[in-house]
Image (cartoon, grey):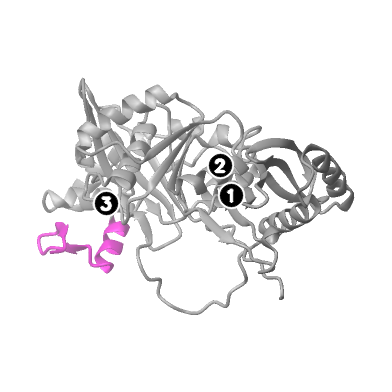
Amino acid sequence: MTARAHIPDPLAFLAPATEHVQVSEADAVLRPTFERHGNEASVRWTEPPVTLQFNALREANEGAHAELAVLHEAREIHWGRLSLASTSAREGLVKKLDAMAPGSPWRLLLERGCRLAVAAVREQPPSVLLHPRVTDGPRYLIEPFLPLGETAVLFGDGGAGKGFTALAFGLVATAGAAFPGGHEASRRVTGLYLDWESTEAELEERLYGLTRGLNCPGTGLYYRRMTRALVDDLPALQAEVSRLGIGFVIVDSLAPACGAEPEGADAAIRCLNALRALGPVSRLVIAHVSKAGADLRTGAARPFGSVFVQNLARSVWELRRSEEAVGDDLTVALYHRKTNRGKLYAPIGLRFHFASDAVTLSPADLQETGDLLARTSLAFQIQKALVAGGRTVPELVEETRARKDTVARTLRRLRKGQRVVEMPDGRWGIKA
């Protein structure tokens, strides 16, 4: 009978995959159960009672390697690094296993297990022919913030509320909470918070306040303390994402996740590619802003580091806090700085209220926070001013502090787009 081996799709991490490999109906020795989670794989036989556990599976220039643990009757009898395609390395291990547990067909078991592991690590999605079509189903995990299965970046200065905002998104995605403005998740997923900056206790305290403020449960979000660059922990993270069925990952934050020289292009590309290698999960990366960007009083800033941070992300949001807020409130604005799908979303105002036992979120009117409004586009400022009533060009110049010719040019563009109308008395207003 011709041998057949069904290897799980290495990108299908969201649901743990178990595959049975049948080589010969007459030989039960070669009927293992193969299971893979990221870069970990196990090959198990019931008779003989043997398990080959491959960890840190990877292929480099010198071939496929793994850390191999061999269990016989649930007892570990070997652990070590093995070059999977090396005949001499396998033969040396067979001799050791024969001495440790005689009577089992170790050569056959090892040959079959290593062959399956190598096939798994080399498995890649096939090339497919593109067909012009409209994508079915939702395109966002949380519209317009988090593209489904892709990477979004949320960046801002320290103390702007990035962590609270990201955690609020986590509760929307995992617990069904509603984000201010009616933004909801297109599906419920399990989340994973990768933390280089804080502690588990602090995140749980924030989670407690937000769950009470958003009136939702706090289940569905896992926490993982991180100390190394994301690339260095990628095999373990891939396995974790697969085992837990993760659909949403929060990275807090980008600079330590990049590792050494986070401002360089190489570090940013490797980190964002590693996130992509986690599989079809939605990813939110928290990033900082450069000192020059933090000092800006108007206009858009960029995430700290290489331009590839913004270029490789599918959606980028800048978060700014208002210096005008007082008391227990934190007023912030979310500015959509980059998208690869459709048009940029209008700025969103958000207010956090910190009480003793809850953190509540509510919409904030940017018209009431001059410093946040000044960071929006002139077109947005003009439309916000006209919502309150008709304005002349000189009045709009005074309110926006922009040049008269710039205001007039912007009004003409908005009129062409049927956003505003010019009235007979010389004032401008919002088009009904």
Q: Which numbered disc covers residue 102?
A: none
- Crowding near pointer 3: few (<14 within 10 Å), some, many (20+)? some
Give whichever of discs 2 and 3 has the lower sequence position.
3
- How far across and how far down the image is residue 242, in percent? 51, 49
- How far across and how far down the image is residue 217, in percent? 25, 38
Q: Amino acid at mark 1?
A: Gly
- Residue 402 seen in render: no
The answer to whether mark 3 and mark 1 are in CB contact below 8 A is no
The answer to whether mark 2 and mark 1 are in CB contact below 8 A is yes
- Does residue 364 sit above or below 327 in this rendering? below
Task: Name the residue rendered at 69%, 54% in the picture.
Answer: 117
Return the residue at label 1.
38
Return the residue at label 2.
237
Q: Is residue 298 magenta?
A: no
Using the image as rendered, state which of residue 39 and residue 289 is in the foreground.
39
Q: Amino acid at mark 3?
A: Glu
Mark 2 vs mark 3, foreground winner is 2
- How far across and how far down the image is residue 411, in percent? 26, 59
| Left or right placement of residue 106 versus residue 156 in this view | right
